[in-house]
Each structure stands twice: as structure tokens, then as C-alpha cells.
Image: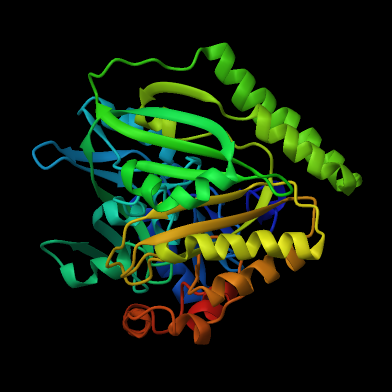
Amino acid sequence: MTRPGGQWRNWAGSARVRPQRVEFPRSIEAVQRAVQAAASQGLRVKAVGAGHSFSPIAVAPGVLLDLTDLAGLVGIDRERGRATLLAGTRLHRVPALLASSGLAMTNLGDIDRQSISGAISTGTHGTGARFGGLATQVVGATLVTATGELLRVDESENAQLLPAVALGLGSLGILVDVTLQCVPQFVLHAVERPEALADVLPALDRRVEEADHFEFYWFPHTDAALTKTNNRLPVDAPRHPLAPVGRWVDDTLIGNAVYRVACDIGRIAPGTVPLINRTASRLWGDREFTDASERVFVAARTVRFREMEYAVPADQARPAFEALRTLIDDRGWRISFPVEVRFAAADDIWLSTAHGRASAYIAVHRYWREDPAEYFEAVEQIMLAHGGRPHWGKMHTLTARQLRERYPRFDDFVALRDRLDPDRLFANAYLERVLGE
């Protein structure tokens, strides 16, 4: 988000910069002009969306292009079920834009504040063993290249570039529109309940396979898991949504307001964290409802935190998670935020964390007022030992040398970057670290 005085910082407060210039383009032509002007002045240029990445991937010391005003529906191909959106369109606005055509996004994560371009460019994903990340829904995109020209990538133009452009880290150009392959609208039957971790882990593979969407949260210092099981139903299936008051109590009052206070207490008095977590594991969840897909997938998140997430091969989910539990016990840390475990199908996108393998995602968090470094660095070593790949939009320490070993198409992506942006107009310090200079 861009603040008065020109300073930009991300949602978590983990990255900030004061750009030399901030622009708010309202059209694709305005983006082209901004890129050409930056290049002529020897300034680097970066586009930003909602600033919801925890890594410094969007930091723009030169020219910052805030795409807030480059938003909305370009058009819908009803016959093929495709929608083209301007790059700055926020995910939470997409369902309403698609509704009149009876379409929906195939899958979503649990946060919908991001822009569509930011979400796909960083590898945002939801959960579900038969569903890929958001970038797998991309069937076309338009980039403004380093020369200010438009590059269209879809099945009929430059099709070979789509697996790179769909998840490009903002390093190949400025995305100005995105075409998504949608599905007919659907509803989800949701069952959320606390369970004994000893019951969840032995049956993990079966539960992931049997449900359309399965995930669980584990509260450190407890033996409890909050499981979330969502199954897809036709749009005309009977709906039994949460009562507005009950939803407000669970999600807004307890899930955010009360939990924020609990995190502050835990920061000041770490000894209270186990009790807080045991209480939270009993209060959260234990509900069943059926509602529109976007109302089930997405949860409100107003308590600020820092996050690191790694994708490991799906068959490494349990051993990696067990090693994480042991680490927390051995170190004696007091961790107030739950650990989240989700799943995704394999895909062929070059820099996708699920490239070539069914994946499990293990995410760790710390309250934003706490230093996450020691915890995250130790967890990172566990994830690396289990074949992990870090989420591009979340905190990690890996460099291009380490990442090259984990992505079979890494050098192909770098070669494309060399061709499209040889002078590194779209680079910043983070991209130099993870892709090389």
C-alpha cells in the first residue's frame, strides 16, 4: 500500500520502500508510457497490487506502478467459459464480475485481498489434491515488455511462453491483463471441526484423496487439529449458510478481535501461549454449512502476521510436519499462531512450487510484532531436507543457486528473462537474489 509522503509498505510491514516516483496508471497505454519513460531515465520499474506478499518481491526503489486503478472486467467468452480481467483487479471483486455469466474461479486461497496479477505471479494457491494453484487457471495474458511493447501470450500467440508468463514473479514485464479458464458456479459443503491430531495424521492421505478440498491447522503446544473439509456441489444444491450473527462471532469477534488481544498477551507473557492455544483450538471451528464457493474458500484476516510457506512432495507432508512439531518442543519456543497444512495437484508451470509433483504446503506464522527469524530459519532447514520449495511471496532465505537445483525449468525461465528484459528494467534486490543478476 502506498502511504502519504510516497512510502510504500506491504500488508505485513515486512517490506517497505520510498520510490523515486509513484504512478497510478488507469489504462494499458498509461503502463506502456510509464515503462518507456522509466527506461529512458535509467530507472527500474515495478508494478504492485495489494502488497499482500510477505517477501520483498514487489519492492520498487525506482518507479512504482500502483495498479489499483487498472481493474475490472475486459470481457467474457461464454462459449469457452473464460474471463479476461485487468491486472489490478482484486480477487474479492472477481465473483461479482463473473456472476452474471454463471462462472466462478476453479479454486481460491483463504485470502482474497490480492490483485489477480499479484496472486498468480507469486504462486498463490488454495487446497485440494485435484486442483492446482491460481496460475494453472491462466490461459492467456498480456505483458508490457521492457521496450514498452505489448506481448500477448495465449494458445494462439506465443503459446510456448505461457508456462513462464503465468507465474513470472514480475520479472518478465508488467502484466496488464489476465485470461482465466473458469468453471460453472458451484457451492461448497463445508465441515470444520477440531479433532485429535493423533486421529488426523494416520488418515491424512485418505482424507486428502476423498475430499475435494482438505486442510488442517495445528495449534502448537496442543494435540488438536482444526480440520476443514470442503466438497463441491452443483450451484442449485440446497444452501445452508452460516447465520450472520454466528459467522460474525466466529470469524470477526473470536477469529480476529479476540485473537489479536491473545497474540499481544502471548508476546508480553510467553508462558500463557500454551493455554491460549488450547483455548483457541476449542473455540474455533466445529461448524457445518453450505454456501457459494467464494464464501467458503475465503476467511477474513485482520490480525497481521509474518509467514513462511514451503511446498514439499505430498508424500513428505507427514514426516516434515512431525519434524516441525519436534523442533518446537525441543527448542521450547512459545508459538501462538497455528501451522497450516494444505495440498495441491502437480502442474507444468516452470516456477510453480508444484511443478512436476503433487505437493503439500506447510505454512508457519508469527505475530507481526514478534521476530520470526529464528523460528523460520529452523523450519526452513526441515523443509529443505524434505525437498521443499519456498512460496515466492512469503519469507525465505534461498538464492538462485539453491533454487536452480529445485526447479527443472529454472534455466529456461532465466533464459526467457534474459531475452525479454536483458537490462533488468523490472528487477529489484529480491529478484536478483532468487533469479540471479
Any part of residue 19 in sight: no
Query: Which image quarter: residue 364?
Result: bottom right
Residue drawn at (78%, 41%) of the image: 263
| Relative vertical location of residue 377 with respect to residue 194 in this rendering, above or below | below
Give 366 or 399, whichever is nearer the viewer.
Answer: 366
Q: Is residue 339 left or right of residue 151?
A: right
In percent of width and height, residue 57 lies at 55, 65
| Relative vertical location of residue 415 with respect to residue 76 in this rendering, above or below | below
Residue drawn at (68%, 49%) of the image: 305
Residue drawn at (60%, 61%) of the image: 322
In percent of width and height, residue 105 lies at 30, 40
Residue drawn at (34%, 38%) of the image: 72
In percent of width and height, residue 291 lies at 38, 22
| Relative vertical location of residue 356 with respect to residue 2 in this rendering, above or below | below
Any part of residue 258 in sight: yes
Give 24 or 220, whichever is nearer the viewer.
Answer: 220
Give 177 or 382, whichever is nearer the viewer.
Answer: 382
In percent of width and height, residue 123 lies at 42, 59
Count how many numbered circles sit on residues in the image.
0
| Relative vertical location of residue 413 with respect to residue 144 in this rendering, above or below | below
Colouring style: rainbow
